[in-house]
Amino acid sequence: MKIRNSLKSAKIRDKDCHVVRRHGRVYIINKKNPRMKVRQG
């Protein structure tokens, strides 16, 4: 999992990405490509 300051560039890379908020952190998860996980902060 990559940790980034801004998730906007990670989100536009794939159309199957979803932004999820868990425990006060923002994640991007992708069901079709599970390797593409990003966390903010």
Image (cartoon, grey):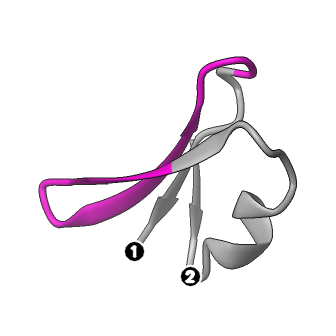
Q: Is residue 32 magenta?
A: yes
Q: Quadrant of residue 35?
A: top right
Are the residues at dot 1 and dot 2 in contact (C-beta closer than 8 Å)? yes
Q: Position of residue 36 (x, y in %)?
A: 70, 36
- Reply above or below: 21 against 40: above
Checking the image for residue 5, the label placed there is 2
The residue lying furthest to the right in this view is 13
Q: Which residue is mark 1?
A: 41
Q: Nearer the viewer, residue 25 or 12?
A: 12
Q: Which residues are magenta?
A: 19-33
**Amino acid at the residue labelled 1:** Gly
Q: Position of residue 15 (x, y in %)?
A: 80, 45
Question: Which residue is pictured at 75% across the width and 22% down the height?
Answer: 33
Q: Is residue 13 magenta?
A: no
Q: Nearer the viewer, residue 20 or 38?
A: 20
Question: Which residue is pictured at 27% across the width and 63% down the height?
Answer: 25
Q: Position of residue 26 (x, y in %)?
A: 37, 63
